[in-house]
Amino acid sequence: MPKRKLWDPEAMKKAVEAVRTKEMGYKKAVKLFNVPRATLKDYVKKSDKPIEDIVSAKMGRKPILPVELEEELVGYCLQMEKNYYGVTASDLKRMAFQLAIRNNIPHPFSLTKKKAGKKWMKLFMARHPNLSFRQPQSLSRARVQGFTAENVKSFFAILKPELQKINFNPNKIFNVDETGISIVQHKVRKIITAKASGQFIPPLMVFPRKNMKAELLDGAPPGTIGGCHPSGWIQPELFTKWLRHFVSIVKPSKEDPVVLVLDGHYSHTRNLDVIDIGRDNGVSIICLPPHSTDHMQPLDVSFIYSFTAQTRNNRRGKEKKRNSRKKRVRNLKKNTTGSNKKRTKKRLKNGSSGEDTSDEEPILVSFDEEDSDDNDAECLVCQKFFSQDTKGEKWIRCTKCFQWMHEDCVENPGVNFTCAFCFEN
């Protein structure tokens, strides 16, 4: 189907105006403004409407509800969302039906269901891109009452003078927050810090145990520090440890201060050591308003949400792969047991003993779930996974750091192989 309205709208307006005022005829206007003759005639005949409305009118079938009613419906949806009462798809279709009935507008909506159809809702959402459907999230009453215009204004009134001290330099504005990541059966709390310019400070990882071991930080980002607590949650002494770590890396001073934005957790705000360290080292600590971090915490909105979603998807993918592997092992074991029973019955019928004298080699199957991570190891050199190998590449493991690598990616692979990274250290 050929595209329509390929002509210039401004040229069409001038052509219609020229013909209506009888400055020129159709033939001259078509040549001068390069517009189609039939369209120009149709627009000139519609003298009861303004030129702007005629030229900008959309082609095709008109919507069931007039523009004014649709704008009223959009405003109602936005107002309900502002008041934390989301409108579902069924609610939207019912309201469209009610508007059509109330204003005596002919419609093809269902009289039995008393709501509009899916096609109308799809076209309505396309006409109003400022509306979209989202997955609802649970929200406490405290968050609804805490995130108000007054609290937000008071927060920025406190933040602005501190930013003026550092001349609004994004390299001196930091945000800190905690999140949980899952390793094996435990959940580790991780303190993440980021600059406003996008750079990150090496994190502090809190493990749910009593004693800290250096091996727990194997594979962690360079510069990461660790801490332990039986609950696995951040504690005042752990946050004090992280703040000293932060000062040692950023190296702020009273002459060169920085701004640190954080939430109102008791380990942050009710901690005299944190206040003293910040005061002595030029760290201006700004606390976010209570019950508003889901909207105002930069790391919550930008980084942690996508980070947790990605780790959740990776964990689900590994669980799915592990379950499929277990299923294959069960089927293999079942088939092997069934075939052995059949051979045993056949030998007993022939009068032979029940001993298996066949020359077949036994099938060895590993049921060790601890090797699940090694089954999809990552090459330390080329960063490719074992599952991506298609040509049967050979792998070798370092005797020092126990990391896997392709034999083709290293030099002099042997029995007591040591990678170049460990050899340099």
Image: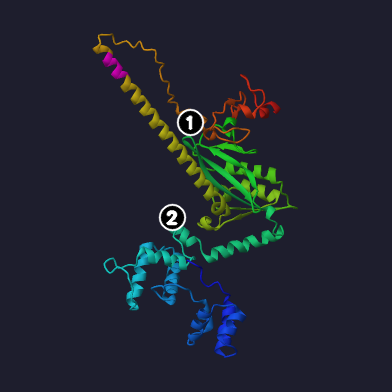
Give whichever of discs 2 and 1 has the lower sequence position.
2
**Is disc 2 surrounded by few (<14), some (14 to 19) or many (20+) residues within 10 Å?**
few
Task: Name the foreground residue: 311 vs 361.
Answer: 361
Q: Residue furthest bottom?
A: 22
User: For the residues carrying marks 2 and 1, which lies nearer the camera in this image?
Assistant: 1
Task: Name the foreground residue: 267 vs 233.
Answer: 233
Q: Vertical placement of 284 versus 340: above or below?
A: below
Q: Which residues are magenta?
A: 340-346
The structure's colour scheme is rainbow
Kindly state the secondary structure of the residue where label 2 is placed. Answer: loop
| Residue 414 image point, x, y percent | 63, 20
Q: Quadrant of residue 69?
A: bottom left
**Disc number placed over residue 137 in the picture, else none:** 2
Residue 80 at least partly seen: no
Q: Is residue 373 magenta?
A: no
Is label 2 in contact with label 1 (beta carbons under 8 Å)?
Answer: no
| Residue 311 image point, x, y percent | 51, 43
Q: Amino acid at mark 1?
A: Ser
Q: Quadrant of residue 383?
A: top right
Magenta stretch, main secondary structure class: helix
Q: Amino acid at mark 2?
A: Gln
Q: Vertical placement of 424 versus 42: above or below?
A: above
Disc 1: which residue: 372
